[in-house]
Image (cartoon, rainbow, N blue to C red):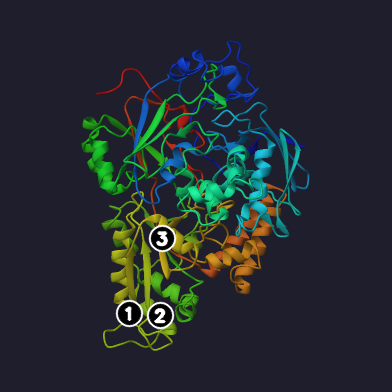
Amino acid sequence: MRHTRMVLMGGAAALGLSALSATTSLANGYEQAPMLDPLVADGTLPPLEARLPANPLVFETVNQVGEYGGTMRRAILGGGDQHNIVRVIGHENLVRWSVDWTEIKPNIAESWEVSDDATTFTFKLREGMKWSDGAPFTADDIMFWYEVFSDPRLTPSKHPIYVGPEGPVTVTKIDDATVEFKFASPNGLFIPNMAYGFGYYPVNYPRHYLSQFHADHNPDGIDALIEAEPAATDWISLFTLKAGHMHTPAFWQNPDRPTLHPWKLKNAYGASDRLVAERNPYFWKVDAEGNQLPYFDAITWDQVEDPETILLKAFNGEIDYMNRHLGRPANRAILTDNAERGKYRFFDTNDLPSNGAILMLNLNNADPVKNEVVNNKDFRIGLSHAVNRQEIIDLIYLGSGRAAQTAPQPVSPLYDEEMATQFTEFDPDLANEYLDKVLPEKDDEGFRLGPDGERFQLVFMVADVFGAQFPDVMELVTIYAADVGLDFQIRMSDRARLQELASSAQHDAYIWNCAGGQSDAYTSPECYLPFGTAVYWAPEWAKWGVDPTTGIEPPESIKALFTQYDMVKAAPTSEARKSEMDKLLDLSKDAFLTVGLVQSDPAFGVARNNVKNVPDPLPISGQLWYPSPYVSQMYYEGGKSLP
């Protein structure tokens, strides 16, 4: 049966949008940004009609058709802030969510078909579509990704959305514009998974460019390329540097890599104090009047040392659009006081994760003593009762949010009050009662001893990112822990380094947030079972879940979670899928795998008064890398620039 769209498993606030078909005909032809006119005139670029695909995507309009020109100014931190770029540029998958988050629509693929048994997914690509350097984008590019995906040298650990119970997906080229993805058993979540987040993998591997770094494709020239790259020791490390995933810094440190995104990097992230992205002249989307997108000519990110500097830049009118690092409750008052000076306004973001601050104990700790203790559910319950969540909310988040575990939010159809509130009562006596079952002995200073007779200590890795105030939260948690005899230490570092350690299980504990607060729990369940690449509380179980020959084999209770998630994916209808998901959440609730602290209220961002077409509220869910689905290619600078 043929599909070009899919209904969302849950609601979202409507934005009053004017929806347009992806096949809308445009009687007046197409127009390009004025900055490209001289390049076409002197022959540097081909005419617009030769740069667009045969059937460009006509994108929805929020308020009005925009105006060309200008630069959107942002700021970025060094070391692991690459999602700051991803969220503004990197969100072009085969399919996408509609702007109001109600259905899945065509994107890079102009249409798709799903077999009746939900095992086979056939995507029809846009004929004549091109990479940012003008090279054709075809099924061969997706097949090159599949080659890399299938090669254990280059992909030793596969992302689970491309792996079914029986093994990895099989991808077949039908013709130059058609590819087929086939699983051995039903996968009802594959299209939603392809619409955002890690669905980006198959369409970010330009074969004509990346094949030069692959020894099998370039046997005669690979040695010279390795020698020319100081950070490469062999062709595998060279390929990893040049073909790094978009959610890693490597992707944004290679400005030579062609892209399908609306803007292309002019320089490398981290190479200078200002990162610049310029319009992609081959971008394949147009607005309702046939104007090639994007509207802004460029985007810049000034690299700064800390979030406080970003705040100051907003006060000074140097930020055109941003919520990352700014939208914390503690900043609202001071941003309000400086709004006239900075000439910006606020917009809300419906960012409702399963929890905004989660204590993730590494249940795959290489230290056998620590591993035994943290895998005892009584220990986690005791820790949960030791934390004064309301004090954290009052002191750190200025009263915004509510005490909760890691669970779907009250607005979600999957909400379970018991799951959200279990063990959240602040009760040091009850905490001691549970902890005494696990670590009954204490040293002379009142700290608990491990089974080995040594003081039991956990080191929490902490990064100060996107306004989450994790360092401040952990300072209080260490005090609460000490009150019940637990020695918690804090190790601060940048996000990239911490995630590298956590992903390889080289840590005791981590504080982070987690998706799955809304209907994205179906596709982003990484805190309900060890599924995904961001399972910082059990990375080795997550590896085993994808490939049982790797990682660490989990106990039967965890295997039951994997089995139940297979039932979720195989469910034939949305009603059956919800029923199976409810069962999964019941199992996860009983396992009590992480200790959630606060479900925060929706965050906010700021936009300069002359930046138009900014949705308010901005819909966000899970791994949707906002401002997707209404992406920043539609934002524009209206009228005369502000001083």
Label 1, residues with CA under 10 Å away: few <14, some 14-19, many ≥20: many
Label 2, residues with CA under 10 Å away: few <14, some 14-19, many ≥20: many
Give the alpha-carbon distance from disc 3 to disc 2, as whole Å.
Answer: 28 Å
Counting from the top left corner in percent of width and height, residue 505 is at 49, 67
Counting from the top left corner in percent of width and height, residue 154 is at 60, 55
Helix, strand or loop at label 2? It is helix
Left or right: 272 with respect to 47? left
Counting from the top left corner in percent of width and height, residue 167 is at 71, 58
Residue that badge 2 annotates? 435
Q: Using the rendered view, name the quadrant where residue 11 is placed.
A: top right
Is residue 34 placed above or below 493 in the rendered structure?
above
From the image, which quarter does the C terminus lie in?
top left
Q: Report the front residue among 414 and 638.
A: 638
Counting from the top left corner in percent of width and height, residue 592 is at 51, 68
Q: Report the front residue among 271 and 346.
A: 271
Q: Furthest residue to the top?
A: 28
Residue type at tag 1: Gly
Residue type at tag 2: Leu
Q: Report the front residue among 39 and 238.
A: 238
From the image, which quarter does the N terminus lie in?
top right
Label 1 with label 2: CB-CB less than 8 Å: yes
User: Does residue 519 show up?
Assistant: no
Q: Residue at x 62, y 40 (%)?
A: 207
Helix, strand or loop at label 1? It is loop
Residue that badge 1 annotates? 485
- Among numbered discs 3 and 1, the one appearing first in the sequence: 1
Depth-wise, is mark 3 or mark 2 nearer the camera?
Answer: 3
Depth-wise, is mark 3 or mark 1 nearer the camera?
Answer: 3
- Among numbered discs 1 and 2, the one appearing first in the sequence: 2
Residue type at tag 3: Leu
Q: Which mark is residue 498?
A: 3
